[in-house]
Image (cartoon, rainbow, N blue to C red):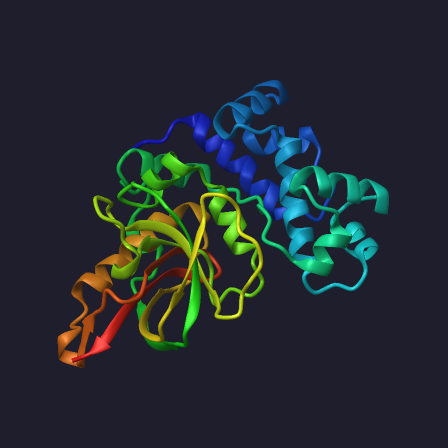
Amino acid sequence: MELSEKVKAVSRMQRYMIEHLDEDITLDDIARASGYSKYHAMRIFKELTGRTVYETVRALRLTRAALDLQSSEKVVDVAICNGFGSHDGFTRAFHRQFGITPQKYRAELPPINWFVQHPIEAYYVLKEGGKERMPAEKVSRTVTVTVVERPARKLIFLRHNGTDYFSGCEEMGCEWEGFLNSIPDKFDTAAEGRLPKFLIRPNTNGRAFFVEVPLDYCKPIPDGYEIAELPPCTYLYFNGMQYEDPNDFCIAIRIVNEAIENYPFERFGWEISDDAPYLIMGAEPETGARTAVPVRKI
């Protein structure tokens, strides 16, 4: 699939924001990165992402600030490190973004909707059926498999009726990812996948967005989300290699999916279990693609 020049330009703008988030980012900088005039660059960015450039940069910085607050003692230090000139200005911006002051957030660490910027090129690749824009050789085909024992815990989940991540987001929106990943107590990153059999309702496909948290987790969850206890289980973690271009994440995911399809579970004494969630954790350049398959000994 040949992506439009408009999509590629917005992708260049997204990448520039991430790479220069610690610097002063101007509209002229963004326009140069896009390869278009300032007016045209701003227009197509808003058209394809639903946000202005400044809204996106601020949301990225505030989300990084929220992560910093989970381990920092001074709000003012976090404000300065994330490009805010004053404590008061940071507090107002943080409250507008997340509905809570940074002081209260640092003290209580409730789940909030972190902003997640998805690579626009990958979005359009998936929307058109997952055809890669680049040869798969750009991403290593090596996949490691690790046995992970999980204790009794809780699952926070949001049901959807889609067949995968993309269709689930079209139905429910993508806010779930920032919300679930903002939980500092989580065992691993938020995931999409199949619920355990005992949580699947009749006449549904059993798909959900979810994250695992400790058994004693008791903070409030928003309307529409559910929480349930899970028994101990064993996962086989399939982990692909790191990669450079964020837009290659669909290639990285495909490689891990092929590794799971071809893995000789029975030869190594395993069978896939339906007593625990099947965790599809997507892919990030720093971590590679990851999926946790619930198994039991045979």
| Residue 86 visible in the picture | no
The x, y position of residue 286, in whole percent, is: 49, 60
Question: Looking at the image, how many numbered discs can be counted on the residues?
Answer: 0
Relative horizontal placement of residue 230, taking residue 203 as reference (left or right): right
Task: State the residue at coordinates (83%, 54%).
Answer: 76
The x, y position of residue 133, in whole percent, is: 32, 40
User: In which quadrant of the rendered view does residue 43 lie?
Assistant: top right
The x, y position of residue 2, in whole percent, is: 32, 31
Q: With respect to residue 233, does 97 lie above or below? A: above
| Residue 223 visible in the picture | yes
Q: With respect to residue 91, does 257 lie above or below? A: below
Q: With respect to residue 242, does 171 lie above or below? A: above
Task: State the residue at coordinates (60%, 21%).
Answer: 37
Q: With respect to residue 149, does 52 lie above or below? A: above
| Nearest the eye: 116 or 228 | 228
Which quadrant of the figure contains the C terminus? Answer: bottom left
Which quadrant of the figure contains the N terminus? Answer: top left
Task: State the residue at coordinates (82%, 40%).
Answer: 89
